[in-house]
Image: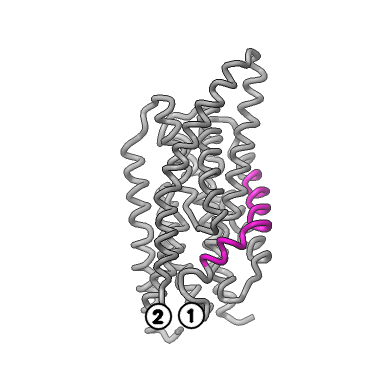
């Protein structure tokens, strides 16, 4: 097999592994933080529903990542490698620090960076739509989470049996996490594989399965630190608030999926957690939220700079 193809597949695996390591917290961090699911149970549920989402519905966002930002005729495997590598390096650094940054923003930044480097025409209209979705998704997630918390709080108050309440909480956590994981597969797997689909190497279905399996491995092996940040450090979560945060953020991501927009599930889940924190009157960790927001602002910028730097290194070494 050609060395370029091997490198492209290896880096796509690396990105998907990074997404699983950093972004799995978006699906199950709140449930793990509330003590409703063990880490192993959470990662198994993520693996199942990410595969379903990526296989059944992942093609829309893959198309936006692979063809919507720069024209596909400019997208060679070498260029895809540079964009993926730039994003992966930054997300790995953030994961080590336990910071839930946006892999979506890292990939988009990497694509913009290589687009600038090769002087490709960049579709700024698509980028504006993506950026708008990035701003709206955490706000909508917070609103949906707050509404869900108020609604289900009334339902739970009408249940008299403690055993039934406990069982309801567990199933709500599994349902909310599964729905988020499905959307995770639809939206986030495209970050790892969309460029390879755009370069003509993978079909959308094959890309979905490859990305989902790689993501599941990342979730199982390296996601605990970020799950702890999302589930424990932002605000104190109970079972009902954990479900509301999960489901509210999943609805926000699902709306973006309808339009094929690559949004950040990291931003959505943090918005959901903040929403239930406000609904319950619990203290929201402003320092932690500030660090996360800084990561969101820094991520696309750093990825653009890294992509430009890696492109220059590839040029100097004669690889492009």
Residue 56 or 85: which is nearer the viewer? Answer: 56
In front of the other: 205 or 192: 205
Contact (CB < 8 A) between labels 2 and 1? yes
Q: How many numbered markers are drawn?
A: 2
User: Looking at the image, which residue is at 44% across and 69% down?
Assistant: 111
What residue did someone put label 1 on?
A: 74
Asked which quadrant contains residue 159, the reply is top right
- Near mark 2 (Cα within 10 A), the count class, few <14, some 14-19 or many ≥20, is few
Q: CA distance from mark 2 to mark 1?
A: 8 Å
Residue 6 vertical position relative to residue 176 in the rendered view, above or below: below
Residue 118: which numbered mark, if any? 2
Residue 215, given in percent of the width and then of the height, sits at 59, 55
14 versus 115 height, above or below: above
Is residue 233 in view? no
Residue located 46% across and 68% down the image: 85
- For the residue pair 110 and 281, the one nearer the viewer reads as 281
User: x, y percentage for residue 122?
Assistant: 41, 73
Q: Which of the 4 quarters of the picture holds residue 312?
A: bottom left
Q: Relative to 243, does residue 62 appear above or below in the rendering?
A: below
Quarter the N terminus occupies: bottom right
Prevailing secondary structure of the magenta residues: helix
Helix, strand or loop status at disc 1: helix
**Stretch of the chain drawn in magenta:** 44-65
Please tell me whether mark 2 sits on a helix, a strand or a loop: loop
Give residue 36's position: percent from left, percent from top. 59, 30
Location of residue 36 with respect to 318 vertically, above or below: above
Residue 47 within the segment the image draws in magenta: yes
Tell me where residue 145 appears, x and y as whole percent. 49, 35
Q: Residues within 10 Å of mark 1 (few under 14, many from 20)?
A: some
Say how the picture is coloured: one colour
Q: Name, please, the residue furthest toward the top.
A: 160
Q: Which mark is residue 234?
A: none
């Amino acid at each position: 097999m050609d060395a370029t193809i091997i490198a492209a597949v290896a880096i796509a695996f690396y990105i998907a592994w990074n997404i699983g390591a950093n972004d799995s917290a978006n699906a199950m961090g709140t449930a793990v933080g509330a003590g409703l699911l063990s880490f192993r149970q959470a990662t198994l549920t993520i693996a199942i529903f990410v595969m379903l989402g990526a296989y059944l519905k992942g093609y829309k966002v893959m198309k936006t990542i692979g063809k919507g930002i720069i024209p596909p005729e400019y997208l060679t495997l070498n260029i895809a490698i540079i964009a993926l590598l730039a994003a992966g390096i930054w997300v790995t650094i953030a994961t080590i620090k336990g910071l839930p940054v946006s892999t979506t923003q890292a990939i988009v930044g990497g694509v913009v960076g290589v687009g600038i480097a090769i002087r490709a025409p960049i579709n700024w209209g698509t980028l504006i739509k993506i950026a708008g979705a990035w701003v709206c998704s955490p706000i909508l997630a917070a609103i949906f989470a707050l509404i869900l918390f108020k609604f289900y709080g009334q339902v739970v108050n009408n249940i008299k049996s403690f055993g039934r309440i406990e069982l309801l909480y567990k199933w709500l956590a599994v349902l909310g996490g599964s729905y988020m994981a499905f959307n995770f597969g639809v939206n986030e797997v495209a970050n790892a594989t969309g460029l390879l689909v755009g370069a003509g190497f993978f079909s959308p279905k094959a890309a979905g399965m490859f990305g989902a399996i790689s993501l599941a491995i990342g979730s199982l092996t390296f996601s605990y630190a970020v799950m702890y940040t999302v589930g424990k450090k932002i605000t104190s979560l109970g079972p009902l608030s954990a479900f509301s945060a999960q489901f509210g953020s999943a609805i926000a991501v699902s709306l973006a999926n309808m339009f094929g927009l690559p949004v950040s599930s990291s931003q959505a889940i943090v918005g959901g957690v903040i929403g239930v924190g406000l609904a319950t009157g619990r203290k929201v960790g402003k320092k932690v939220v500030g660090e996360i927001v800084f990561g969101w602002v820094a991520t696309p910028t750093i990825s653009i700079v890294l992509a430009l730097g890696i492109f220059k290194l590839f040029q100097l070494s004669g690889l492009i």
